[in-house]
Amino acid sequence: MKSKNFDINTILSETGSSLLTIIYKSLLKREKQIILECGVNKGYSTSMFSYYSEKSDSYCFSIDINDCKDVVTSERWTFIHNDDSKVLEIINDYPVLQDQGIDILFIDSFHRADHVEKVLYGWYPYLNKDSLIFIDDIDGRNYRKGKEKDSYYNELNWEEINRFTRDFSENNSSDTILTQYFGKTGLAKIVKVSEKGSLPNRIVNRERSLLLKLITLFNRNLKNLFRSR
Ligand SMILES: C[S@@+](CC[C@H](N)C(=O)[O-])C[C@H]1O[C@@H](n2cnc3c(N)ncnc32)[C@H](O)[C@@H]1O
């Protein structure tokens, strides 16, 4: 594996300081895996996945909306220049993703909960039994007001992605095991238990209209008023 922008030994030696190490360690006992990576950019995670693929008789497909085909050179890697939510189009071009199924899905493309939802629901039916799903960017704390990376929109998006991973897992509790990692920008790991082809349940949340919110607020304040007397 040749990486244009990164040294693989440096990536792998960043034990403890990089969330990518958590992914790498989860892969170590696995062989002959089909990996689907969503979001390439300069190829930090792509370098790790394609390096691991060479070591474990696995194969990595990476999707990006921008052209990132030259970030890595490996006989175990294919770059797909497309939108990662265009699942049927990609499956049509790369039927191996359907025929063999996907063992590792890494979502790190457009950092909005509605996009992550679209990508996860789209690819879920192609995930093999005991496959691993990694969703990057679930910890918005570093973007809070006054923090080093202060960004209102990133804080909001990261928190919504976090919420989505919990809601998704709760609504699919018999088929998924969720672990969340905090620190840096955060990472969610979901183990998918069922066979390839199973469909995930949709998320059902309690509807909270503005009127209901106001009534609840009023009732709470009223109760607190009587409690404090
Ligand atoms: C955070 S970067 C990926 C970082 C990469 N995983 C790494 O570890 O270096 C996000 C990438 O997602 C790509 N992207 C954004 N929206 C996308 C979409 N709908 N489909 C595919 N790629 C997308 C962007 O072009 C960008 O390169």
Image (cartoon, rainbow, N blue to C red):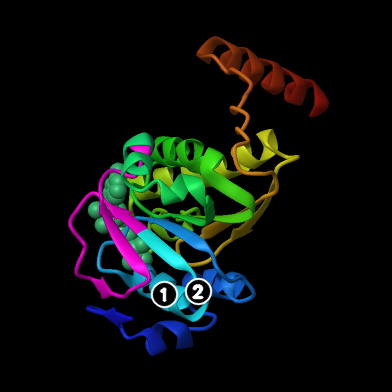
Q: Residue at x 31, y 44 (%)?
A: 93
Q: Nearer the viewer, residue 55 or 99?
A: 99
Using the rendered view, name the quadrant where residue 207 is placed: top right
Few, some or many residues within 10 Å of mark 1 (<14, 14–19, 20+): many
Check residue 84 for magenta coloring: yes
In the rendered image, residue 18, in percent from the top left (x then y), is placed at: 47, 75
As drawn, 155 above or below 54: above
Asked if residue 79 is among those painted magenta in the image, a careful observer would answer yes
Which stretch did the figure color magenta?
A: 62-87
Q: Within 8 Å: ligand 1 and the Cβ of disc 1?
A: no
Query: For this rendering, which residue is in front, 212 or 10?
Result: 10
Which secondary structure, mark 1? helix
In screen coordinates, is 80 left or right of 171? Answer: left
Q: Is residue 154 among the parts visible in the rendering?
A: yes
- Count of picture labels: 2
Q: Give the camera-side residue of 9 and 94.
A: 94
Q: Quadrant of the C terminus?
A: top right
* Residue type of the residue flagged with mark 1: Met
Indicate the quadrant where residue 74 lies.
Answer: bottom left
Residue labelled with disc 1? 48
Determine whether label 2 and label 1 are within 8 Å by CB: no
CA neighbours of label 2 inside 10 A, class few (<14), some (14 to 19), many (20+): few
Q: In this view, does 136 lie above or below 83?
A: below
Residue type, mark 2 in image: Asp
Above or below, 101 against 173 in this view is below
Image quarter for ligand 1 equals: bottom left
Image quadrant assignment for residue 69: bottom left
Q: Name the residue under label 2.
A: 57
- Which residue is located at x 33 percent, y 81 percent? 1
